[in-house]
Amino acid sequence: MRLGKKERQKRILQELQVHPHVRVATLAERFDVATETIRRDLDALSGDGLITREFGGASARPMGHQPDFAERQSTAVAGVERIGMMAADMVRSGDVAMIDAGSTVAQIAPFLTARAATLPRTFLTNCYAVVQGMAELADHDDVLLCPGQYNRRENAVYGSDAVEYLRRFHANIAFIGASGVSRHGFSDVNRDAVAIKRAMMERSDETWLMVDHTKFDQRYLENVAPLEDLAGIITDRMPSPEIVMQLDRAGIRLLAWQEDKIATV
């Protein structure tokens, strides 16, 4: 029995977790389909940012590298701004919120600016893009930028100064990003960023992970924390039923954009 497109593409991703490179001809023979069918599968997976397309086949995305902040913003999946909108809706008047660096997490800034609050809110971040996106809030809300060593690739600050600064505060909620999410937890390619994420989680009542759908079933260099440490995940598209079931078992809420509305699991 031949596999459907979604199951076949899932098997291709599984193959790349074992072998760093796969060839079109080999996959076509394995799945008993035409080579053109495999090429379309690989093009689709590459378009979603899940693999690197190469001549004659594809390779797994490297665990220890990702494009810089500006490139990730320019190649973001369609609808990623909805993640920022849903996250901004969770911040209440008078709240203290910690906001991580990252191209997806930065989507929260313009929506926070657009939402008026009766009581001043306080935002702590290590991301320059977030501060710039919330410039209009300075007259009403407090926007605090961590000290630390500036990383041009990420347009953010990291290091012990930033971590110690965050540990001086307590927040109602933290919004963080990640390079990948799997059953093993959520992970990131940037080891300096992992320290910031852990500090924000430590000092916040609850943590929400902001990731687009291409980050699921992906593992990268350093694990940040197990999934159970999250209050929930905010994403742009409902993940596979297997992932939804896994998150439900772990007691993690899921907010996803589905059919022009927010779906909550």
Image: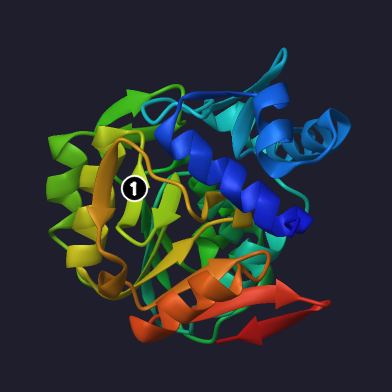
Image quadrant where residue 264 sits: bottom right
Picture layout, residue 64 above or below residue 100: above
- Say which quadrant the C terminus sits in: bottom right
Image quadrant where residue 191 sits: top left
Q: Nearer the viewer, residue 203 or 10?
A: 10
Instruction: Return the residue found at the far front.
Output: 1
Residue 188 as seen in the image, left or right of residue 134: left
Residue 192 appears anywhere in the view:
yes
Residue 234 as seen in the image, left or right of residue 147: right
Q: Position of residue 129 (x, y in %)?
A: 53, 41
Residue 86 as seen in the image, left or right of residue 180: right
Picture layout, residue 75 above or below residue 195: above
Q: Where is residue 49 in the image (x, y as percent from the top left)?
A: 64, 38
Q: Where is residue 67 in the image (x, y as percent from the top left)?
A: 54, 26
Q: Where is residue 192 in the image (x, y as percent from the top left)?
A: 25, 34
Picture layout, residue 236 above or below residue 101: below
Residue at 37% in and 84% down: 249
Residue 103 appears anywhere in the view:
no
Question: Circle 1 is placed at which residue position?
Answer: 187
Residue at 51% in and 48% down: 130
Residue 261 as seen in the image, left or right of residue 231: right
**How many circles with numbers are drawn on the protein?**
1
Identified by mark 1, the residue type is Ser
Q: Nearer the viewer, residue 95 or 46?
A: 46
Q: How dense is the environment of label 1, judged by Cα within 10 Å: few (below 14), some, or many (20 and up)?
A: many
Residue at 46% in and 47% down: 218
Image quadrant where residue 70 sits: top right
Residue at 17% in and 50% down: 165
Q: Nearer the viewer, residue 71 or 171?
A: 71
Q: Nearer the viewer, residue 129 or 87?
A: 87
- Say which quadrant the N terminus sits in: bottom right
